[in-house]
Image: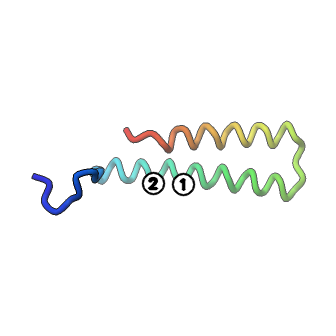
Amino acid sequence: MRGDLPADAVVLTADEATDLADRLYQVRCAAEDVATALAEKAAPADLAALVQEMLASTREAERLR
């Protein structure tokens, strides 16, 4: 029984919601690391490594388990 939920609603358990929030936090931290490195004029190789880490975090965050 779906109650008043729309037909296209996605329902997450509390654990799934917590896991998603954790993964989004990791993405934000990775983005902040990139922003800090840019502000500190980091070397291109260092920036590239941080961007790769951010991409990995976003790929993980976009998956619903």
| Residue farthest to the front, as pictured | 7
Q: Are marks 2 and 1 in contact (CB under 8 Å)?
A: yes
Q: Report which quarter residue 48 is drawn in.
A: top right
Q: Is residue 34 left or right of residue 54?
A: right
Residue in view at x 36 percent, y 53 percent: 17
Residue in view at x 50 percent, y 44 percent: 61
- Spatial distance from mark 2 to mark 1, Cα to Cα? 6 Å
Q: Which type of secondary structure does the marked residue at label 1 adopt?
A: helix
Residue of label 1: 25
x and y percentages locating residue 42 in the rendered image: 87, 48
Type of residue at label 2? Ala
Q: Is residue 10 left or right of residue 1?
A: right
Give above or below for 65 relative to 13.
above
x and y percentages locating residue 65 in the rendered image: 37, 38
Residue in view at x 67 percent, y 52 percent: 31
Quick one: label 2, few (<14), some, or many (20+) residues within 10 Å? few
| Residue farthest to the bottom, as pictured | 4
x and y percentages locating residue 40 in the rendered image: 87, 56
Say which mark, if any, is on residue 21. 2
